[in-house]
Amino acid sequence: MGSFSTWCLFRCGNHFLGKSGDPFPNPVVAPVLTCLDRPPDLNHTSAFPMNIRIYAAFLFLAPAAFGTSMGDTYQQVLAEKGVPKSQIEAGSLQILNYSDGNIKLKDGIVVSVSVVSKPAHPAATPSPAPSQTPADRLAAIRQQLRDAVAKAQNIINQPATATERGAQMRFHPGATKPDFNTVDVRNTQEASYDNEDYVCLKSQPDKVWVGHELEFNSMTKFFYLDRSLPKKKLTNEEMVEINRLYRIIGRCDNELSKAGIQMKPSS
């Protein structure tokens, strides 16, 4: 009888194991057992190194877990596994490809089984989010509108610096509702008090403000919270942010108008 390596070649993990038990690299990961003309005499296990006996035990268990064993016929494979996903034939050789592994047959007899490992915990498919009701959608739009208005008000109503008395200023009553979808508040900013060192209000004669730090803007007046106070001159970056918030406000306002809900000035 020939040596063990004459009859069988075991392949496991990333190594081939030969007669000496010394591994050498191989990129195939799935455990494979390939038998040649006849099996070795496994009764004399002392003739083999311990590592080969351990791998042999593992590899003989792999085909059993797969559901097909070496020596099975083609008909037995089909009865056990069903029709393969694909099949390759070359002379007396056949390779049957299944989702969980591959089976190699020679002259209609199984000579090799390759098992494909599967993840232990497949990712669960997330449940679809419940659809919004019309009332929920309106509530979400109103909340988005409130958030955008609050941010715009915080920018528009920043306090201006007060100091000693000077010229007087006042705001006319009423406010024009901007076209939130198109307006650019940079084009409507007025710096009427740039040439004044200081300005004051008749309603607050004991306070004054630095003129070049103030502005009036007819397209932000809609959100003035206190018209008794001067408004700080906004920077270019602040006005760009106001324009962005106005687009959100405009979109929400259009949606709410369809439901009969109208916006009102802040004061």
Image: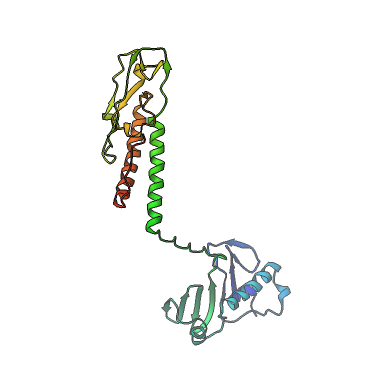
Could you say which is closer to the camera, residue 65 or residue 177? 177
Please tell me which residue is depicted at 31% across the width and 52% down the height of the picture: 259
Q: How far from the left and from the top, in percent, is residue 104?
A: 50, 77
Query: In which image quadrant can residue 41 be found?
Result: bottom right
Compared to residue 244, the image places residue 17 above or below, namely: below
Q: Is residue 204 left or right of residue 75?
A: left
Compared to residue 84, the image places residue 127 above or below, namely: above
Quarter of the image that includes the C terminus: top left
Query: In which image quadrant can residue 48 be found?
Result: bottom right
Compared to residue 239, the image places residue 36 above or below, namely: below
Please tell me which residue is depicted at 42% across the width and 18% down the height of the picture: 162
Please tell me which residue is depicted at 33% across the width and 46% down the height of the picture: 252
Could you say which is closer to the camera, residue 175 or residue 143? 175
Is residue 135 visible in the rendered image? The answer is yes
Query: In which image quadrant can residue 224 be found?
Result: top left
Q: Is residue 123 left or right of residue 186?
A: right
Q: How far from the left and from the top, in percent, is residue 44?
A: 72, 78
Could you say which is closer to the camera, residue 123 or residue 130? 130
Q: Residue furthest right?
A: 46
Q: How far from the left and from the top, in percent, is residue 4?
A: 64, 74
Q: How far from the left and from the top, in percent, is residue 7?
A: 60, 76
